[in-house]
Structure formats: structure tokens, C-alpha cells
């Protein structure tokens, strides 16, 4: 079983990997892409026949904004790009959620091992274990 220092380093490594992955996130947009067919209402049109799917497909992006559903028509030429943007948004959400969970686990692990971690960080920074004494500057010393 790995000790807590190994666990902390593992969590830091994963946190850094997630940050790097988030840095590579491309264009994104939330919502759902919906394929729709409609009937025009003209009695002689093919869409009025029984069993006809209607006119379409027409594509729209639906999402919630401030508690209201917003719909935006997406041109056929932009459907694939919109799918990619929606997938990227979902990837972003997954990465952000995992980053928060990893960071929370790291914070908890650091609370359990404050002395070992602070000594290791001091060694990395080149610090010493001695406490420093504060000295006044020469100007503030009485003559």
C-alpha cells in the first residue's frame, strides 16, 4: 500500500494532467442538437400524406439560459461542427468535475500530513528547517 507521501504526489500529478488537458479544450457549446421534421400545412404537399416524415431534417440547438429554453436553428453545413462543440463541452465538464474531485482529495490528504508535506516542499525550495530570526534594517537601529 502506498504511503501518504506517494498518494499526495500521485494526486498532484493527476491534478497537473487535468489542468493541461483543460488547457487543450477547443471551441465548446452546451445544449442538445435536435433533428426535426415539420409539416407545412398545404393540403397538396407531400408532407400532408399519411406516414410522411414531413420537410426536413431541420437542425436546432436547444439549451437552457436563465431558466428558459433557448433554441437556435443550425444550418446543415454546421451540424457536424456543432456536434463536435457539444462533445467538447461535455469533455470540458467531465474534466472540470474530475479536477475538482482530485483537488479535493489532495487537500484532504495534505490536511492529514501537514508536517511531512511542508518539510518536503521546503526541501524542494531549498529552504532549511531552522527558523529565521527577524532582523531590523540598519536604518531602524538606534545609533
Image (cartoon, rainbow, N blue to C red):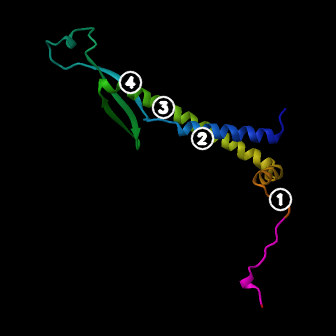
User: Circle 2 — which element?
Assistant: helix
- Circle 2 or circle 3, nearest the eye: 2
| Secondary element at image label 3 | helix
Q: Earlier in the sequence, mark 2 or mark 3?
A: 2
* Residue under label 1: 128
**Which residue is located at x 38 percent, y 27 percent?**
81
What is the CA distance from the residue labelled 1 to the residue labelled 4? 58 Å
- Which mark sits nearer the N-terminus, 4 or 3? 4
Please provide the residue range marked out in magenta.
131-142
- Residue on which the image places disc 3: 88
Spatial CA span between label 1 and label 2: 31 Å
User: If you read the primary sequence from the N terminus, does the residue marked by circle 1 or circle 2 appear first?
Assistant: 2
The quarter of the picture where the C terminus appears is: bottom right
Give the mark, 1 or 4, whose residue is nearer the N terminus: 4
How far is disc 2 from disc 3 in space, using C-alphas? 15 Å
Q: Residues within 10 Å of mark 1 (few under 14, many from 20)?
A: few
Mark nearest the camera among 1 and 2 is: 1
**Residue 52 shown left or right of residue 137 in the figure:** left
32 horizontally vs 57: left or right: right
Q: Residue furthest bottom?
A: 143
* Disc nearer the start of the sequence (4/2): 2
Residue 87 location, x and y as percent?
47, 28
- Image quadrant in which the N terminus is located: top right
Q: Which residue is mark 4?
A: 80
Instruction: Rate crowding at label 2 as few (under 14), some (14 to 19) or many (20 or more) other CA atoms within 10 Å.
Output: some
Residue position for label 2 = 19
Is the residue under label 4 in contact with that under label 1 (CB below 8 Å)?
no
Q: Is residue 140 above or below residue 102?
A: below
Amino acid at each position: 500500500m502506498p504511503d501518504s507521501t506517494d498518494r499526495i504526489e500521485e494526486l498532484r500529478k493527476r491534478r497537473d494532467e487535468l489542468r493541461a488537458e483543460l488547457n487543450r479544450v477547443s471551441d465548446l457549446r452546451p445544449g442538445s442538437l435536435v433533428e426535426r421534421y415539420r409539416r407545412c400545412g398545404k393540403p397538396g404537399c407531400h408532407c400532408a400524406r399519411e406516414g410522411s416524415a414531413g420537410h426536413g431534417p431541420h437542425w436546432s440547438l436547444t439549451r437552457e439560459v436563465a431558466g428558459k429554453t433557448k433554441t437556435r436553428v443550425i444550418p446543415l453545413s454546421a451540424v457536424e461542427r456543432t456536434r463536435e462543440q457539444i462533445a467538447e463541452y461535455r469533455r470540458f465538464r467531465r474534466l472540470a468535475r474530475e479536477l475538482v474531485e482530485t483537488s479535493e482529495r489532495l487537500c484532504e490528504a495534505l490536511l492529514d500530513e501537514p508536517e511531512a508535506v511542508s518539510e518536503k516542499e521546503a526541501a524542494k525550495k531549498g529552504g532549511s528547517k531552522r527558523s529565521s530570526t527577524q532582523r531590523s534594517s540598519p536604518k531602524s537601529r538606534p545609533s
